[in-house]
Image (cartoon, rainbow, N blue to C red):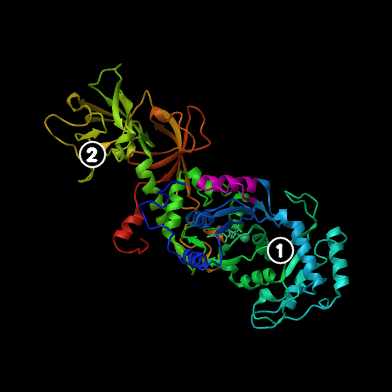
């Protein structure tokens, strides 16, 4: 990752409470090096919340000269798929991080975990329970009511060993029995009331196939996996806080090779966005989006297809920081980070989304002039390109009004405008069809204004983008808006899907782009001058490009911040 990862925009993640804990651990020699991990469950695509966790875990490892593992928490074969494993690896790499040789799977530890389960049974600290899932819930009690011991809690060690071995051997159907830790049914922490360690699941696993028909719970797998890998700081989100005593209990009661510790931070929430794989999966399955990588999805694959640069996501992770309490970040802050990168990096191009024909009557019929146009006024080194200029042009329909209000500085009858990097033109005549719709403008140009300035110093108030009709390449352009209509989708108990924005995608056909974009590279994001940032989509074919609008040019977050309404910076 480059040095400017946490760009000039905002302070980096350094100095957050997790960095402080680690610095103190190193100073006191409680650990000799730092090893973190990012532990996705391969049951969906990664989303922007995960990128927060990825930047934190890999960022810490970089900062302290340690290492970060990528570990798949693949303990639930029913929901996990190879497609998700592959996408997760691709997304972490795209975000700019590298796990080197440290790629692991919880499923690699199934044999070791089984041995440790046997160890706990042998010590009288785990037992096989025949209660159903429903009964276990009932016996477990509530926050205000103590749990009751299962009638099977007092089985002998021999009987437990025998039953657990037979569970593994496949003698019992799904749900018939579970293995539970024997801790404390009266504990104030419900996670301590004999948590389930293993369940029976006759299901094919993407990696272990049918080798197993019992699978460890998250609680029994996670900390032990950390211990096997020598993780020093196991960083997760707040919902695991109440599991921490259990994490510590297993580590304390097993002959594990190292003693990791768990730390919790607040998960990222974003307005107008849902960051739950369960809901995202529903959007995909119900066909409400084009797939996991739909440009409206908050998945990394979706944001990439939309045109959000990885650098902006890393910067954003630094901007939101690491908090101990949950909060909701405004999506405008993310958009601000994206615009900041694109404003610096995206090449400027001409595109006309809603074309109106302009004929320059005093321009020769067969002449083609190549106009030099700057690729990026923010970056001289990006150079210039040539854009062909001819007698017949496309301009944006919204850039003309027959009967303009006072401050309309674009094209109107008798009004002169500048065509960017070309000539000044004046509109003389408006051609309409039978229904009265404007179909063509007849204009004249001033040959002395080539390049966009006049010898007499006159300066039109408006500057328009344009395309030569003979050279323009037809394109499809997809405009995107928030996927949800309200800032907090699904609040007040509504179903998330009720808040889906039915107008979040608008597909425009019959748009035109300049010749240079005819074979744009998929994934390349450019600025269509005056219109916004656009990214070439995978649906593009040679000669018929498709562009996704990444964002418009307007930065509402910067504006709100300038007004003092945000304190994030
Ligand atoms: P979801 O709720 O979307 O299903 P998850 O927590 O079940 O997410 P995992 O694959 O288990 O998804 O997550 C991998 C890691 O990413 C975990 O350490 C988790 O804490 C972290 N993570 C998940 N969502 C967020 C988020 N919104 N903000 C920060 N970290 C997150
Ligand atoms: Mg999870």
Callout 2: SS: loop
Q: In the image, is residue 88 above or below residue 394?
A: below
Residue 350, quarter of the rendered image: top left
Return the residue at label 2. Answer: 462
In the rendering, at what x and y percent does residue 399 appear?
29, 38
Label located before the other in sequence (1 or 2) = 1
* Quarter, ligand 2: bottom right
Return the residue at label 1. Answer: 217
In the rendering, at what x and y percent does residue 252 appear?
68, 71
Q: Is residue 523 left or right of residue 129?
A: left
Residue 101 in view (yes/no): yes
Mark 2 crowd level (few <14, some 14–19, many ≥20, 10 Å Cα): some
Q: How many numbered markers are drawn? A: 2
Instruction: Write the start and end of the magenta stretch as one range.
Output: 83-103
Residue 566, quarter of the rendered image: bottom left
Q: Is residue 493 left or right of residue 310?
A: right
* Residue at the (52%, 67%) spot, across then down: 25
């Amino acid at each position: 990752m480059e040095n400017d990862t946490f760009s000039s925009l905002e302070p980096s993640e350094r100095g957050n409470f997790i960095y402080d804990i680690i610095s103190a651990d190193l100073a006191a020699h409680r650990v000799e090096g730092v090893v973190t991990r990012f532990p996705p469950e391969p049951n969906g695509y990664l989303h922007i919340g995960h990128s927060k966790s990825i930047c934190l875990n890999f960022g810490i490892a970089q900062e302290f000269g340690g290492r970060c593992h990528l570990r798949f928490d693949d303990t639930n074969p029913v929901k996990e798929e190879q497609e998700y494993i592959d996408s997760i690896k691709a997304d972490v790499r795209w975000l700019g991080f590298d796990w080197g040789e440290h790629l692991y799977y919880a499923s690699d530890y199934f044999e070791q975990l089984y041995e440790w389960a046997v160890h706990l049974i042998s010590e009288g600290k785990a037992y096989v329970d025949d209660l159903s899932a429903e009964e276990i819930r009932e016996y477990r009690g509530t926050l205000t009511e103590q749990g009751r011991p299962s009638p099977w809690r007092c089985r002998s060690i021999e009987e437990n060993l025998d039953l657990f071995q037979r569970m593994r051997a496949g003698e019992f159907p799904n749900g018939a029995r579970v293995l539970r830790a024997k801790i404390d049914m009266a504990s104030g922490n419900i996670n301590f009331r004999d948590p389930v360690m293993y369940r029976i699941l006759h299901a094919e696993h993407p990696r272990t196939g049918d080798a197993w028909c019992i699978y460890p719970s998250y609680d029994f797998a996670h900390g032990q996996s950390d211990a096997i890998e020598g993780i020093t700081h196991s960083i997760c989100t707040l919902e695991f806080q109440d599991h921490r005593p259990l994490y510590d209990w297993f580590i304390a009661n097993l002959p594990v090779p190292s003693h990791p510790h768990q730390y919790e931070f607040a998960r990222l929430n974003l307005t107008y966005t849902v960051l739950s794989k369960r809901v995202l999966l529903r959007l995909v399955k119900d066909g409400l989006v084009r797939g996991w990588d739909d440009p409206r999805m908050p998945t990394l694959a979706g944001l990439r297809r939309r045109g959000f640069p990885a650098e902006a996501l890393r910067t954003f992770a630094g901007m939101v920081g690491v908090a101990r309490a949950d909060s909701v970040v405004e999506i405008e802050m993310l958009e601000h980070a994206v615009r900041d990168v694109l404003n610096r990096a995206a090449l400027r191009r001409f595109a006309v989304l809603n074309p109106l024909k302009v004929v320059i009557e005093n321009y020769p019929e067969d002449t083609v002039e190549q106009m030099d146009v700057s690729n990026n006024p923010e970056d001289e080194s990006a150079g210039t390109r040539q854009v062909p200029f001819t007698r017949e042009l496309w301009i944006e329909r919204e850039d003309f009004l027959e009967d303009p209000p006072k401050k309309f500085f674009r094209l109107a009858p008798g009004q002169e405008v500048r065509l960017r990097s070309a000539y000044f033109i004046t509109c003389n005549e408006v051609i309409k069809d039978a229904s009265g719709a404007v179909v063509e403008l007849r204009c004249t140009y001033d040959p002395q204004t080539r390049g966009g300035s006049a010898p007499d110093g006159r300066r039109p108030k408006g500057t328009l983008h344009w395309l030569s009709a003979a050279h323009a390449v037809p394109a499809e352009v997809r405009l995107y808006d928030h996927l949800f209509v309200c800032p907090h989708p699904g609040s007040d108990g509504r179903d998330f899907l009720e808040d889906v924005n039915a107008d979040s995608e608008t597909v425009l056909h019959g748009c035109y782009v300049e010749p240079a974009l005819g074979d744009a590279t998929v994934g390349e994001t450019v600025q269509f001058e005056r219109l916004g940032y656009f990214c070439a989509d995978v649906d593009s074919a040679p000669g018929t490009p498709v562009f996704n609008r990444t964002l418009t040019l307007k930065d509402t977050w910067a504006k709100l911040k300038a007004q003092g309404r945000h304190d994030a910076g």
